[in-house]
Image (spheres, grey):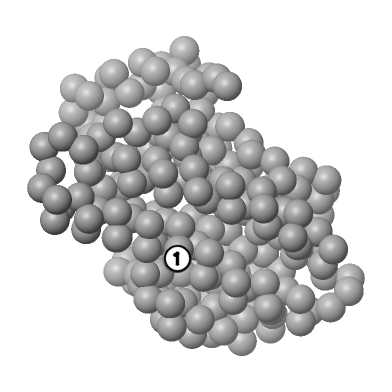
Amino acid sequence: MAIHYRDAGSAAEAVRDSLDGDGHVVVRADLADAEAVRAMVDSAAAGLGGLDVLVNNAGIYQANPVVGSSYEEWQEAWRSTLGVNLAGAANVTWCAVRHMMAAGAGRPGRIVNVGSRGAFRGEPTHLAYGASKAGLHAFGQSLAVALAPHGITVTSVAPGYVATDMTSAELATPAGDVIRGQSPFDRVATVEEIAAAVVYLASPEAGWASGAILDLNGASYLR
């Protein structure tokens, strides 16, 4: 397995060291840098001897309300958010697909995109984030059709709130009670719950799910 990071190198190394077996690698890139992305994917493929599975999970969550932000802040939020969440994922995918196709017959590829409930429910204070995740879902469904002849399947998950480093500060405030109350289970998802769905979608058994978007939000938003 290859673990990608931008800034959290120690955390990435800790994940690598926790994995069973050997041969796992850690690779670094700013996903907003297209050339760094290409070098990162090539490094991962070289370290692993090829690529079979890609999970597009990197993302940034930056507030950019249409009312209350300056025009400069508005532009910067769109540039940075789309640069990582959508264009970055698209560039990683382009590079990874070349390695998947080079593997040849008998090694079907799997791509799993981690989107968001916000793509459908709306993100009124994080507009660029919601739009980037909606774009990621649409990108994945288009890819599912384009890559099927090459034996590569593409699926997406759409989580609601998940207890991660990115959400921990907000969940620890009074707003956290409101967020947990969005689900009839009165909690948010664990990382393990989302990971279990991604592992299934990346498995050989999930090939016929290509094009699907799996909601993982504890019935907090139904569509």
Judge by depth and name the residue closer to the eye, 104 or 73.
Answer: 73
The residue tagged 1 is 88
Is there any visible trace of residue 170 in the rendered image? yes
Q: In the displayed structure, does residue 113 sit left or right of residue 104?
A: left
User: Which residue is rendered at x = 29% and y = 54% of the image?
Assistant: 78
Q: In the displayed structure, does residue 158 sit left or right of residue 183?
A: right
Q: In the displayed structure, does residue 156 sit left or right of residue 33?
A: right
| Amino acid bearing label 1 | Gly
User: Which residue is rendered at x = 21% and y = 58% of the image?
Assistant: 76
Where is 131 relative to 110, above or below?
above
Rate crowding at label 1 as few (under 14), some (14 to 19) or many (20 or more) other CA atoms within 10 Å. Answer: many
- The quarter in which the C terminus is drawn is top right
Q: In the displayed structure, does residue 149 sit left or right of residue 65?
A: right
- The quarter in which the N terminus is drawn is bottom right
Q: Secondary structure at mark 1?
A: helix
User: Which residue is rendered at x = 49% and y = 43% of the image?
Assistant: 134
Residue 152 figure quarter: bottom right
Hey, which residue is sitting farthest right in the picture?
Answer: 106
Q: Position of residue 170 (x, y in %)?
A: 23, 35
Q: Position of residue 102 (x, y in %)?
A: 76, 82
Q: Position of residue 99 (x, y in %)?
A: 69, 79
User: Which residue is rendered at x = 42% and y = 81% of the image?
Assistant: 36
Is there any visible trace of residue 15 in the rendered image? no
